[in-house]
Image: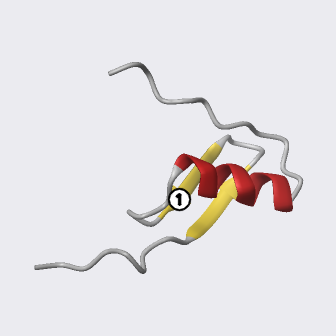
Amino acid sequence: MLDLKRLKRVSQVDDKRHFCIVEPGVSYFDLYEYIQQHQLKVWVDGPGPV
């Protein structure tokens, strides 16, 4: 059994090439908060309907 609840870190967001590297527990809201805090010029595209 793996416990991934502490893996919630945004490692890198590149606003020039438009990609990010995140750990498995990062949610859309976590990524959005990170982008807002660091005033990056990218935006998070919402998930598609299921």
Q: Is residue 43 left or right of residue 29?
A: right
Residue at x-position 38% and y-position 63%? 24
Which residue occupies the extreme top position in the image? Answer: 49
Between 11 and 5, the one lying in front of the other is 5
Scheme of image coloration: secondary structure
Q: Nearer the viewer, residue 47 or 41?
A: 47
The foreground one among 19 and 39 is 39
Across and down, in percent, residue 9 comes to 55, 72
Q: Quadrant of the N terminus?
A: bottom left
Up-down relation of residue 17 to residue 34 (above or below):
above
Could you say which quadrant of the image residue 16 lies in? Answer: top right
**Relative height, residue 39 to residue 41 (above, below):** below
Residue farthest toward the left in the current orientation of the protein: 1
Q: Position of residue 3 (x, y in %)?
A: 25, 79
Mark 1 is on which residue type? Ile
Q: Farthest right residue?
A: 39
Residue 21 image position (x, y, % from top left): 53, 59
Q: Is residue 17 left or right of residue 21?
A: right
x 67%, y 56%: residue:
13
At horizontal 42% and vertical 80% (from top left) the residue drawn is: 6
Report which residue position mark 1 lands on.
21
Q: Is the residue marked by circle 1 packed among few (<14), some (14-19), or many (20+) residues within 10 Å? A: few
